[in-house]
Image (spheres, helix red, strand yellow):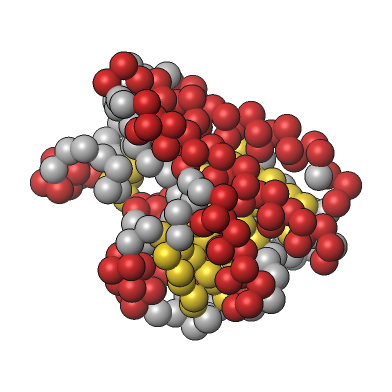
């Protein structure tokens, strides 16, 4: 019997953080599937570049907004309603890196928590309201293996990603009867702007199979979103072959 897949053609997708790294690679890949996508970031120039490079067969829309603020999320979902007429899938990957807690000013670590954790919860709640009214949908959160490895120096970042992981696994049980799927992608080290090393160092790490390319995570996101309606990928952990901190 042939396995059913979910086509993304025409699907209304909100992609948070689609201007850099994993988000930007995901924007291009999902656009190529014919999805209708709205994404956002804090920087207009980066947004313009991401939308221009994505191309694809779908309708692409973008606004500047801050996932860390209530006003930012409200503006995003107003745009979702106006441009997409609703949302079938949420792909949340807007996130910031962080230094160790004792090396960060209070306003800085609080901002990371607001972006990486509160922004995910706020996006999920607004998306769920729309999904429940229409009879279902799919929430996908980009987490991190930092929740497992707890590497030195990542106390703030790990806390936010652990929060996302616990939130998603619990939320999945709460929305099971609403036909809403919940999935988490847990990447290891990835060549993105979040990495503090130089472009040359990142290229070397990729060549040594110590770091993944963002496009590989985007392909995993596509895989999860395109499973059949009966298949819910709960957690998908992806690491480079030589993950130094695992």
- Left or right side of 170 for 140: left
At horizontal 83% and vertical 44% (from top left) the residue drawn is 176
Residue 100 at x, y percent in the picture: 32, 21
- Give the left or right position of residue 45, taking residue 67 as reference: left
Q: Can residue 55 be seen by looking at this rendering?
A: yes
Q: Is residue 84 above or below residue 29?
A: below
Residue 27 in the image: state x and y as whole percent.
45, 66
The image shows residue 197, relative to residue 124, as above or below, that is above
Q: Nearer the viewer, residue 127 or 78?
A: 78
Question: Percent position (x, y) of residue 98?
Answer: 33, 32
Quarter placement of the C terminus? top left
In front here: 8 or 156? 156
- Which quadrant of the figure has residue 29? bottom left
User: At 61% across and 38% down in the image, what residue appears?
Assistant: 235
Q: Residue at x 53, y 81 (%)?
A: 59
Q: Position of residue 96 (x, y in %)?
A: 38, 41
- Which quadrant: the N terminus? bottom right
Quarter of the image for residue 42 reads bottom left
Horizontal relation, residue 187 to residue 79: left or right: left
Q: Residue furthest left?
A: 200
Residue 219 appears in the rendering: no
Name the residue rendered at 66%, 72% in the picture.
Answer: 81
């Amino acid at each position: 019997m042939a396995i059913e897949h979910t086509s993304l053609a025409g699907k209304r997708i909100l992609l948070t953080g689609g201007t850099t790294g994993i988000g930007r690679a995901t924007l291009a890949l999902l656009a190529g599937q014919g999805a209708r996508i709205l994404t956002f970031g804090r920087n207009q120039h980066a947004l313009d570049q991401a939308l221009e490079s994505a191309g694809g067969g779908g309708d692409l829309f973008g606004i500047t907004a801050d996932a860390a603020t209530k006003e930012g999320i409200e503006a995003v979902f107003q745009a979702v309603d106006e441009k997409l007429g609703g949302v079938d899938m949420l792909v949340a990957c807007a996130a910031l890196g962080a230094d160790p807690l004792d090396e960060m000013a209070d306003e800085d670590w609080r901002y990371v928590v607001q972006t990486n954790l509160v922004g995910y919860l706020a996006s999920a709640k607004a998306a769920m309201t729309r999904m429940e009214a229409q009879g279902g949908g799919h929430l996908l959160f980009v987490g991190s293996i930092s929740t497992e490895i707890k590497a030195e120096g990542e106390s703030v970042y790990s806390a936010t990603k652990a929060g996302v992981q616990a939130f998603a696994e619990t939320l999945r049980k709460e929305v099971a009867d609403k036909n809403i799927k919940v999935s988490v992608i847990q990447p290891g080290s990835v060549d993105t702007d979040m990495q503090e090393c130089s472009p040359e160092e990142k290229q070397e790490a990729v060549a040594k199979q110590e770091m993944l390319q963002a496009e590989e995570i985007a392909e995993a996101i596509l895989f999860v979103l395109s499973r059949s309606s009966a298949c819910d990928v709960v957690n998908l952990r992806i690491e480079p072959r030589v993950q130094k901190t695992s």
